[in-house]
Amino acid sequence: MSVLGQVLRSLQDPQDGSLDPGRVCIQLVRACRHAEQHMQGLERQCRQLKTDIDRLEEQGSPLSQRLAGLEQATLAALVRGKGLEARRLATAVAATEDEQDACRLTLERLRRRLRYYQDRWLGAERHYHDLCRQLAMAKTTACVRKTMATIRRHPAVTLVNAKQALADIRAREQRQGQAPEPDDPPAALCPHSVEQVLARLQQQLGSRP
């Protein structure tokens, strides 16, 4: 049973069917704590994803620099007519391009997950503040007394309101559960071949003035 379900089931006193404000406050306090813990868990997840994204982004610049240096060395080897050395360097170019592609795909996946958890955190924050407002109202003595008086005079109206509240909260819970975490399988990488690298660099060499 969800926390919100427990809250709503505690609204009615087992003796006369009226609302029990004491139980409402206790359950709302528990619901607020649960919602706060949920927010903290989502916040930790967002921080971890941001850390992973920053680490991968930091790797991008050295990769690009290494790739540029390898390409220049391969071009120089081609100019000198050193085919074996050019092929060895082209192999390193292809491997670095594969590493760069893998890094880019991982970054895209992490950014999608970060957006997902950020959206969930915003929804959890709204839900938490809504629970806090309900708790503040329930704690107000005058409001509780007035509500209890109204309940004793109009029990049927109270039952309708409780059922509507249950339906609204269940609908909100269902909407929150409809968006699963994006966990795309890793995309198949297309390895860069040495022949492709050599052909591209030889074409680049031939286009020079």
Image: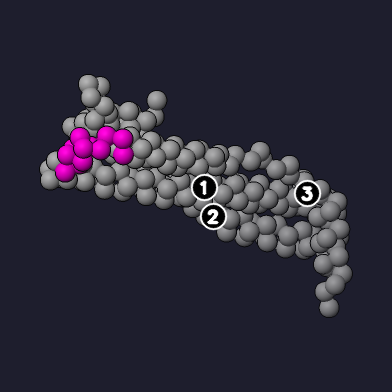
Query: Is 145 in front, or is 153?
Result: 153
Q: Describe the colour scheme in one phrase.
A: one colour
- Crowding at label 1, few (<14), some or many (≥20) Cα neighbours within 10 Å? some
Check disc 2 and give the amino acid type: Glu
Which segment did they paint magenta? Answer: 146-157
Reading the image, the residue beneath label 3 is 192
Is residue 178 a member of the stretch shown in magenta? no
x and y percentages locating residue 135 in the rendered image: 23, 42
**Which is more N-terminal, label 3 or label 2?**
2
Q: Quadrant of residue 154?
A: top left
**Which quadrant: the C terminus?**
bottom right
How far apart, in angstroms, are the residues tagged by discs 1 and 2? Answer: 20 Å
Name the residue tied to disc 1. Answer: 116
Residue type at mark 3?
His
Q: Marks 1 and 3, Cα distance to the nearest angstrom?
A: 32 Å
**Residue 4 position within the rendered picture, expressed as x and y whole percent measured from the top left:** 36, 34
SS at badge 3: loop
Judge depth for marks 1 and 2 and give the one in front.
Answer: 1
